[in-house]
Amino acid sequence: MVRFRTPSGSAAAGAADSAGGGGADLGGPEAPVPGLPRAAPWLSTPVVVVVGVLLSLWVTGALGIEVGAPLGLGDDHLFLLVQIKALLDGFGLRFVPALGFPGIQDNLFFPQFDLSQRALLWLLAQVSDRVFVVESLVYGIGIAAIFVSSFVVLRVLSVRPWLAAVASVVFVVSPFFARRAGVHDFLALYYAVPWGAALSYLVAAVATVGGGRKGPVAAFVALCLLIAGTSGLYYTFFTAMFVAVTALGMAAGQRDWRPLAIGLGLCGALLVLLIASGYRWHLADVLFGAVSQPRRQHYETLYYGLLVSDAVAPLRELGLFKGRFDIYSAVMRQFPGGERLEWPGVLLGAVIVAAPLFVLVGLFDRGPRPTDRLRVVWLSFALITFGLVFAVGSGLSFLFSYLLVPVIRAPTRIIPFLSFFALVSVCSVVELLLSEPTRRRRVAAGTTVALLLVGVPSALFPLSRLQASTRAGTQELRTGLAAMLKVVHAADMRAVLQLPVLPWPEVPPQRRFEAYQHMLPYVVDAVGSPVRWSYGLTPRQPQFAALRALVEGTTGVSTERARGLGFDGILVEKLAYTEDELAALAASIRTGLAPGCRIFEDGLRILYALAQPPDGVACLPEPPLQAEGAAVSARFTADDAPRTWLIEGWSVPEPPGTWSEGRRSVLYVRLPAARTAAGVTVRLDIEPYRPDPARRKRIDAVVDGRVVATLVVEPGAPVPSEWRFVLPADVVGDRDALLLTFAIDDPESASRHGAADPKTLGFLLERVVLEAAP
């Protein structure tokens, strides 16, 4: 039978626990132990908790942010912002009527199982009516919750208060938090992890609450279940997985079915809470097919599995193996999902990697009968080892998805659990060292704690750095949104069609535009605004087909049908289109726009009114329409590059552009329909690779074996940023496209000039424009 009892050990170990300020009963009164120093008053549990919370808020940057200014305005962070705005508008958790016009955004099509976090959002929405104030408060409370959760569970495992506080701060300040904050917000706030891990220690009978009395134990287990079961699909799943593994191991080792029964009961409770958290009373809609669910693929774990190799990242930040890491980083960027770099600091990362070896040591250990403190250590190592085997991309997570249900597509999100198990093992080792107050053991314990504090510099102050980056990188975006919304309200619009028409959620970017950016106007609009926006429908909702019917291809729009659906405005996102597409789209809209007109435009958006704008809203003068077929252009940045143009000798497109590789690169180009007798002008925005200014560079442009242009950069001359030449009419002929070959006489390897990039580079291609020659 599984018993929840006080951890056993040597008398010295018990004495050390008492001297540290209380045992597993969370600071209950105990008799002083002769010969050991009493805990200082300033190390009492309440003081330590307050100091630890404040320190956690400081080192994460939460105390340094401007409350009310956005932490982020992109990626999955917009899910959090939309939920906050919907609650401020008085909507529930399922429907967001302001999105998805002419239908309604239904969150049940993309369920979220983070009921505890959303309950916090609801509470904060009663306190403030500003989206970004609530956003700041969520992170502040969430960080405090991570610290408190870790501290409480470590105290349950008989870790003295000061050590539990130090370890909990380390647990908060992690690369995982730094990289997930502002993207996957509810994953970043992993306060559920210690509670979920505590269930495994309780099942293994190596932890106790309230002296093992049934009432406190039952209350603590219920609290663990409630928090772990309502804090997201991944954390609930990993909690159940580790509980099941622990229970199965105990049942097999003790030849007793009761631990397994307890483990299955806990897993069943977690499943019920998970379903209730995600579906609540709407479960029937899912079971009977009224609302379909997202489809995952089993092979996605191969992309988003745990990379044990990322454990080298903390070493690089300490200045170790920098050259090797740069090469590793360059290679990993070539793979989808690679280079996440979310592993904890040096000591915890080393413990995780070495856990399988430690398990073998424990298997062959012939020392005295292990105490509960040692059992905590060995159990932690065993759970880490199983977690590693499960979470690697081709590990048990793949088999689970392949053979059962493909719901856990990103097992790398197990890192907070592995980190906490490693933290528990380190704290337990320190307690064992301090159980005998010899100088050597104290030095070893101090060294261990010092190594624990050697974290990852990039994990420090992530929130303040994130907010500063958002402030600097979105100035144009935020200014333009405010100006656009002012015009929307002045024109008394009630429903705006957002172009391009894209489904919600999880669709690839269109050119340089992320689909979730369609939700930004709703997020930054005033609370209670009557304006409804078209983005927010899934392809499985019938109203989405009506939206699709409004557009033809990429650039055709029926303004008459849009009016018929109730739209009185069209908002065009420029980043989703090339210049040619944007011109064609404008021509299509203007065809049936009257009596409406264009009433707003900046560098990112165009707003059209489908009706005559009221007094005070001026129509902007329309530029003349570009003649059809006058020019063809293409950008070759990471988001825009037309891959079908890159025939041979090109690298993977990067944010600045696409590098030519080797001595020969072939580009497919479409030719403009409008031409003159002089031929076609080609304009290339390029940057020849010349790290050594003393070298001469030559690039020939060749068509059908004929050199049509040559670019020469003489030694000492500045590197050009543009190359113009004319394709003669006899070369162009009447064809619609041709192959343009670039012959580079002196490509160079970037690695020879101190870079980690092994490619042999010729020039960086940023943009190509072809138009009729004058």
Image (tube, rainbow, N blue to C red):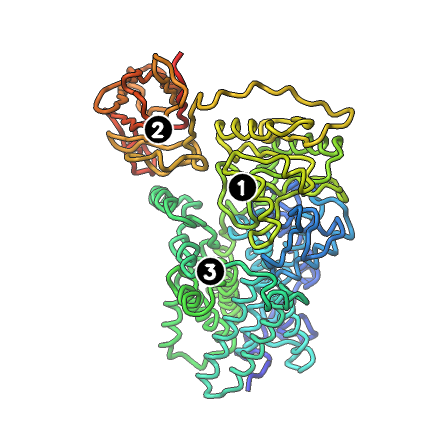
The mark tally for this picture is 3
Up-down: is 349 above or below 220?
A: above
Up-down: is 441 above or below 175?
A: below
Where residue 270 appears, as percent x and y from the top left, is 59, 71
Q: Residue at x 55, y 75 (%)?
A: 12
**Which residue carries the number 2 mark?**
669
Q: Amino acid at mark 3?
A: Pro
**Which residue carries the number 3 mark?**
411
Per the rendering, the mark at residue 514 is 1
Q: Is residue 771 left or right of residue 741?
A: right
Q: Nearer the viewer, residue 503 or 112?
A: 503
Q: What is the crowding at mark 3: few (fewer than 14 residues within 10 Å), some, or many (at least 20)?
A: many
Q: Are marks 3 and 1 in contact (CB under 8 Å)?
A: no
**Mark 1 or 2, nearer chain start:** 1
Q: Residue furthest left?
A: 705
- Tell me, yes or no, if residue 19 can be seen here: no
User: What distance separates the C-alpha of mark 2 from that of mark 3?
Assistant: 42 Å
Q: Comparing marks 1 and 2, which lies closer to the viewer?
A: 2
Kindly indicate the quadrant of the structure image that contains residue 616.
Answer: top right
Q: What is the crowding at mark 2: few (fewer than 14 residues within 10 Å), some, or many (at least 20)?
A: many
Label 3 element class: helix
Label 2 element class: strand
Q: Amino acid at mark 1?
A: Glu
